[in-house]
Every structure is written in C-alpha cells, then in structure tokens.
Image (tube, rainbow, N blue to C red):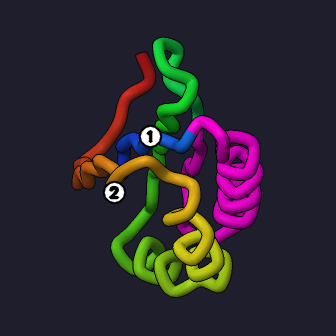
Amino acid sequence: MIVIAGSVVIRPEQREEATRAALAMACATQGEPGCVAYRFSADLADPNTFLVFEEWESEDALARHFQSGHMRVFRERIPALVAGPPRIQRYTVAGKTAM
C-alpha cells in the first residue's frame, strides 16, 4: 500500500476556488480503481493550510492516477491558488490495523 500525506498553504483570497478545486479532484479520484482513500481537509490552526491524505492499493494505481485527466486539470489550476510549494511525503506501508 502507498500512503501520501502532506500540506499546502493556500492564498487566503483564493480559498473558495481552492476548496472547489480540491473537492472536484477528490470526487473524481475516489472513483479510480486502486484508490482506497483520497481527501483534503483544512488545518484547524490555519484554515488556509490544506492537508491531503491518500491511500493507494498499488504503484500501478498511483501511476494511472498521475496520468488521469482530472490530475492534469488540477495541476494546471493549483499554481494560481497556492502561496508556496506543497510539502508532500510518500510512504510505502506493509499493512494497516484499525485502532
């Protein structure tokens, strides 16, 4: 399993547009084969910091995601909405257990 987690600071004046872009991206991605979880949320201490969390079944599923049309559109839209580069980490996970 592959987990991707990170954050990006959104320009305050672009927050509504960034929210729309994030929701559209999440909605389109959640239906992709191999996507276990994909969501954006806002940091409670700073609502202009968006958090992303993704779980993928395989490397192939993630590779297909990066080639999707909605990913291309998202990548085109996001530079005008963010205040700086994202901080994203990728993890390869052997398994998970509910707590």
Principal secondary structure, stretch drawn in magenta: helix
Which class describes the residues within 10 Å of circle 2: few (<14), some (14-19), or many (20+)? Answer: some
Residue at coordinates 39% horizontally, 41% vertically from top-left?
7
Q: Quadrant of the N terminus?
A: bottom left
Instruction: Confirm whether the magenta stretch covers residue 17.
Output: yes
Residue lying furthest front: 13
Q: As drawn, is 9 to the left or to the right of 80?
A: left
- The correct choice, above or below, for 15 with respect to 27 in the image is above
Magenta residues span 12-40
Question: Which numbered disc covers residue 9?
Answer: 1
Q: What distance separates the C-alpha of mark 2 from that of mark 1?
A: 24 Å
Looking at the image, can residue 3 be seen? no
The kind of residue on which mark 2 rests is: Ile
Which is nearer the N-term, disc 2 or disc 1?
A: 2
Residue 43 horizontal/vertical position (percent): 50, 23
Residue at mark 2: 2
Q: Nearer the viewer, residue 78 or 3?
A: 78
